[in-house]
Amino acid sequence: MSETKIYLDNAATTKITDNVIEAMLPWLKEGYGNASSLYSLGRKSAIALNKARAQCAEALGCDSREIIFTSGGTESDNTAILSAAHSARESGKRHFITSAFEHHAILRPMERLEKEGFTVTYLPVYENGIVRPADLEAAITPDTSFVSVMAVNNEIGTIQPIKELAAICRERGIIFHTDAVQAIGNIPFNIHEQGVDMLSLSGHKLHAPKGIGILYVRDGVPLAPALLGGAQQGGRRPGTENIAAAAALAEALRASEAGLSEKTAKLLAFRGRLINEISRIPSAKLNGDPISRIPSNVNFSFAGQESETLILKLDLRGIAVSGGSACASGSLDPSHVLKAIGCTPTEAKGSLRITMSDLTSGSDISGFLEALGSILGQAPIRD
Ligand SMILES: *Cc1c(COP(=O)(O)O)cnc(C)c1O
């Protein structure tokens, strides 16, 4: 296997940064106490956990008690939906709304609910990959009790009008959840300002380790826990808390907020360069809105090419990028996201997602562009 020298798959996962590792170490070494224990070793862990929670709340613009630590984005998304389903069974309002291009951590639970008698409306996302608030308004019925629309799409990086969507739901007493896994750390996002009721985020997409995330639940919004067990986190998410991971996430959120404007300026320049240069390749077509997308994301279809082949050829040169989505890899189904924005199956089959982070350098971009040019120069173009 070749060594990866240029990592451009930051929407799949990110490198843990040194400051984050530093923040974790004390809780992996001496500070191993159980946060529920009464003696000092345990109380130190409880204090660290409270501190991490407060730091996360500060970075996100919410209150500490509105934060539930989870194992990541998937658990947060599932919990939000299953909790809303629990309330819906009691109220009888079994109509949910989401978008056609959500992550599978949203779509799969929605599909299960449909099998159990719920009705789910999937909002269209159009060619630009952006949900229209008017479509949400039109989809709402007296039976609607829950809406979930992602803040930023994980394949094409398009930014959704969350504030407007949340306001429409708020006026009508409908719970609004957003999967903000790809938004947090990539664009400014203040929970209070956006007005959402529930939100999911994941640590490993912003330089914290895998296996830690947050489910934000606004004060007053009911939560039916997905796991049942001890009294940890007020019983809302039982299981002995992972102090090291919580401390890591708090540090990652702090650092990403502190570095966001610098990162944005740098990545906007890189994104512009990628889009300009790749657009010169005759077979290339940009997927998703060129402007209203996070600075770190570029997604192109190459007519007549196959993602897998391109990914493996780039890997041989030490470059990591992805196709439709990491979760879909290994299957031959074209990406549901690209299908939702109207790509033909052929276009979807030949897509590449290039995603940057604050660790990306100008020479990474040059190295990638050079490799891509030479690979596509060699490859036969059928169309
Ligand atoms: C990565 C991702 C998830 C899943 O998060 P995990 O922490 O890997 O479970 C959910 N939603 C989106 C948009 C993602 O990008």
Image (cartoon, rainbow, N blue to C red):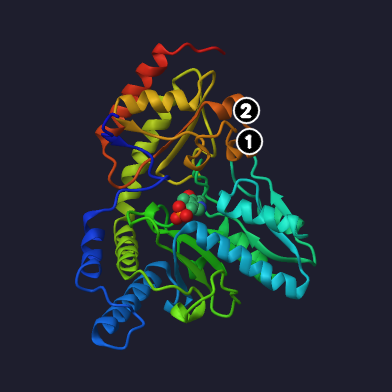
- The residue type indicated by label 2 comes to Pro
Foreground residue among 104 and 197: 104
Question: Which residue does the image show at 57% across and 58% down from the upper left?
Answer: 162
Quick one: quadrant of the N terminus?
Answer: top left
Q: Position of residue 227 (x, y in %)?
A: 54, 70
Residue furthest to the bottom: 38
Residue 183 at least partly seen: no
Residue 257 at least partly seen: yes
Q: Which residue is mark 1?
A: 339
Quick one: quadrant of the C terminus?
Answer: top right
Q: Is residue 262 left or right of residue 215?
A: left
Q: Is residue 88 above or below residue 356?
A: below
Question: Which residue does the image show at 48% across and 35% down from the upper left?
Answer: 299
Q: Is residue 196 above or below residue 11?
A: below
Q: Is residue 316 left or right of residue 329?
A: left
Q: Which residue is mark 2?
A: 345
- The residue type indicated by label 1 comes to Lys
Crowd tier of the residue under label 1, counting other residues whose Cα lies within 10 Å: few below 14, some 14–19, many 20 or above: some
Q: Is residue 180 left or right of residue 269?
A: right
